[in-house]
Amino acid sequence: MPSKKNVKTKGSNRRKQKQPRDNIHPKTRWSSSSYAAAAVALGGAALALGWIGWTHIISRQTNDDRMILSSKDLLERIRRPASFELASESDRTLVATADIPAETDLMEVPRDLMIWDLDAARDEFVRKELFSAPMLKGESSDPMSKRAALLSAYLALLRNEVVSAGQLQTSAARAIPSYEEYSSFHPLLADMMQMKKYLGEHSPAFQRLVRLRETLSLEYDSFASSSTIFSSHVSLDDYLTNRIVVQSRTFNVPKLPESELPKMESEFYRQNIGVDFSVDVLSIKPVMDWMNSHVNNNVKVGGYDAKKRAGLAWTTKTIHKGAELVNSYGKFYDVVLFSQYGYVPSDGTGTSLASLAVHHNVGLIGGMLDSSMKNSLPP
């Protein structure tokens, strides 16, 4: 669903007036002189060969057709060995149209539909305007946070038409939930004073929500301080919306082959922003990310088939006709599901934390909570 351009927000989050597109650095392929400059910056002309080697990967993603595809059209672009459809055109729920046996190949999403954090790093505007952001340059930020922030910023720029991509990726970006959708239920976009009143100032849920909101706001400030174009065209609410997308709808694609990521290019990112994309990449996988989550899932989203250039998913149990296709995000505390994904299971299958520290601070409880939840924080 396309996000609206003129969403009104409160206070400092209000969107600033957009500048003419002529003021935006255009996305073009690097010239030979740019290759040489990059090589010198990295300490040797030999690296220029790496840049030349991966320009064909970027060109494969370029598409001049700007028509935005609907969710139904996107569904038709994936390979579906099994039978399923959208429950309706008004939402993203997927249902089986016939019985699907367990261990059946369910779908293959082509690379051209996916949006990777690597795509963000390859965008010329992002390299020029955002690579100098303090959080990307600093050693204090962990690589996973850098990658999640980079992809979030790129999605916001793409959806606000500051940068451009091919028809398929642009359509995939427009199909993910908008600010209007998330603001209707997600606590990260809610008024913090109201959440404090509802949850209790010292409750685990509120404390985690506050820390997460502060962390993500600092990410936005880092990018905004690096680029006036970014701050003029992407509001805090824009960024938080896409950060929610990244922390709740992305999948890992492990161990990219050199056909997708040449060594020279990989080395460039390691030296410039401290990120090793050769280990894995974060990916928006359209259609796969439309599935709801439950611990009793019937679908497993797998890795990436480099030969087919496609993401894979299959059934884990028999899915009967009319039943919903359900993935699993994993097992988390309810407070993590609430702040990261914006929901808590209503059937009691989540893991709850009981705390006496709701309206009064209890240090021991808080210390135990921080320790037990250390590995449950989002990227």
Image (cartoon, grey):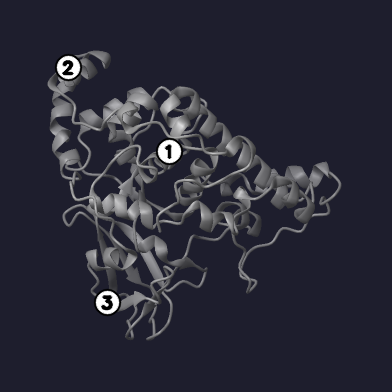
Distance between mark 1 and mark 2 Cα atoms: 27 Å
Q: Secondary structure beneath disc 1?
A: helix
Looking at the picture, how far across and down is residue 187, in whole percent?
Answer: 63, 53
**300 to 41, vertically: above or below:** below
- Label 1–label 2 contact, CB within 8 A: no
Nearer to the camera, 70 or 340: 70
Residue at 41% x, 68% y is 92
Looking at the picture, how far across and down is residue 338, in whole percent?
Answer: 62, 57
Please state, as top left, top right, bottom left or bottom right, where the N terminus lies in the image.
bottom left
Which numbered marker is on residue 82?
A: 3
Residue highlighted by disc 1: 153
Looking at the picture, how far across and down is residue 261, in whole percent?
Answer: 22, 38
Residue highlighted by disc 2: 36
**356 to 24, vertically: above or below:** below
Q: Nearer the viewer, mark 3 or mark 1?
A: 1
Looking at the picture, how far across and down is residue 123, in whole percent?
Answer: 29, 34
Residue at 46% x, 71% y is 297
Q: Is residue 152 left or right of residue 280?
A: right
Distance between mark 3 and mark 1 Cα atoms: 35 Å
**330 to 299, vertically: above or below:** above
Q: Secondary structure beneath disc 3?
A: loop
Q: Earlier in the sequence, mark 3 or mark 1?
A: 3
Nearer to the camera, 156 or 275: 156
For label 3, the crowd category at 10 Å Cα-Cα, with few meaning under 14, some 14 to 19 and many 20 or more, is some
